[in-house]
Amino acid sequence: MATKKQVLYSATKPTGNLTIGNYLGAIKNWIGLMDKYNCYFCIANLHAHTIDLKAEFVKERTLEQFAMFLACGLNPEKATVYIQSMVSEHTELTWLLNCNTMMGEASRMTQYKDHVAKGEKGITTALFTYPILMAADILLYNTNIVPVGEDQVQHVELARDIANRFNHKFKDTFVIPKAVIPTVGARIKGLQDPTSKMGKSGDDPNNVIYLKDSDEEITRKIKRAVTDSLNNIAYDEKNQPGVSNLLTIISACENKPIEEVINELKGSGYGALKKRTTEAVINVIAPIREKYLELIKNPKKLIEIAEMGAKKAKKVAKVVIRKAKDAMGLI
Ligand code: ATP
Ligand code: MG
């Protein structure tokens, strides 16, 4: 008998346009996982509203990201590619899990603590409780594996704790998920601030290469990327973060070890390094952008594909919700 494929769950928030960091660090690896696992790829639009965003902004980013997922090669026939708000079971399970989460646990989540520590005004309760929504996202599909960056490990741990508590208190209901930090994906830093991660919701567009940037924009942004005055092409994150980041980008785009890239560029200046980075990035982004521009022309078709994904997701989610409600004595 064929063994059942393990379930893998991954998501991005539509808080901005997808970046080359999202692609090289996450989406590119997901492509290869579609054969091995039963994959769920979600546009987590409910999570976007934990911060203050306009409705139109979230709607546009959601459709754009969905189109970008498809343009990058996520296959809705092979995997379940869907938009979170189309599957109401996410919010339903969140309440059931809310009843099984301790204040202490939720208070320990570093992202919430960071926002509070910065003294930000207008923090919503959602910013406090969204890790519980994330636990629901994961537990809703009997997920085994959640590929995440370091910053999200704590949230998967919370999902495990809640699931274990629930299974103990009521009845064995949830599969216990595991966080996996991918070893293959590159961590891409900002072009203007190469000491921190390139993020899609940052303020400075010059710091970020978006997957929908034109060749001219890519060229201009890389030309302006921060380097140093050492004039030495070497990988040294501490003393040469900018140069190291460009090397990481080339290596990830061209699928070759950094040492090989350094060897090829031996004796060249930063001008050549930037030219090479630009070529590598354009080679990756241009075909994705072309597909994306085709897809985004037809939002009706995109919604249809998203509905197909939501239907597949709901089929599994419904069963898990019923089990959880039964376990809790909810008629
Ligand atoms: P935000 O700034 O809103 O948090 P983000 O760019 O960090 O946006 P997420 O939606 O939080 O994007 O994450 C989506 C996926 O992309 C995650 O798997 C995350 O680890 C990965 N990712 C995000 N930024 C990078 C980066 N700079 N390098 C590598 N991987 C990244
Ligand atoms: Mg993030």
Image: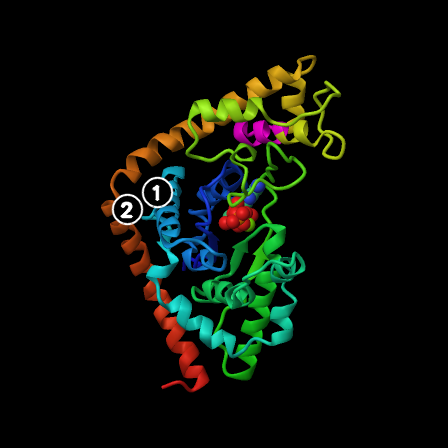
Q: Is residue 41 visible?
A: no
Question: Where is 306 relative to 224, above or below?
Answer: below
**Which amino acid type corresponds to the residue marked 2 in the rendered image?**
Leu
Residue placed under numbered mark 1 in the picture: 67
Q: Is residue 189 left or right of residue 68?
A: right
Question: Where is 274 relative to 327, above or below?
Answer: above
Q: In the image, what residue occupies the spot 35% across and 30% down?
A: 290
Mark number, residue 302 = 2
**How far from the left and from the top, in percent, is residue 76?**
33, 48
Q: Is the magenta stretch mostly helix, strand or loop?
A: helix
Q: In the image, what residue occupies the spot 39% across and 58% down?
A: 84
In what element is the residue under mark 1?
A: helix
Question: Where is 328 relative to 155, above or below?
Answer: below
First in sequence: mark 2 or mark 1?
Answer: 1
In what element is the residue under mark 2?
A: helix
Is the residue indicated by label 1 positioned so its CB lies within 8 Å of ligand 1?
Answer: no
Q: In this view, does 288 lie to the left or right of 28?
A: left
Q: Nearer the viewer, residue 262 or 46?
A: 46
Q: Which of 199 and 262 is in front in this view?
A: 199
Determine the CA span between mark 2 and mark 1: 7 Å
**Which amino acid type corresponds to the residue marked 1 in the rendered image?**
Ala
In this picture the colour scheme is: rainbow
Does the magenta-highlighted stretch encompass residue 253? yes
Does the magenta-highlighted stretch encompass residue 323? no
Q: Is residue 129 visible?
A: yes
Q: What segment is highlighted magenta in the picture?
A: 246-257
**How far from the left and from the top, in percent, is residue 67?**
35, 42
Residue farthest along the front direction in this orientation: 121
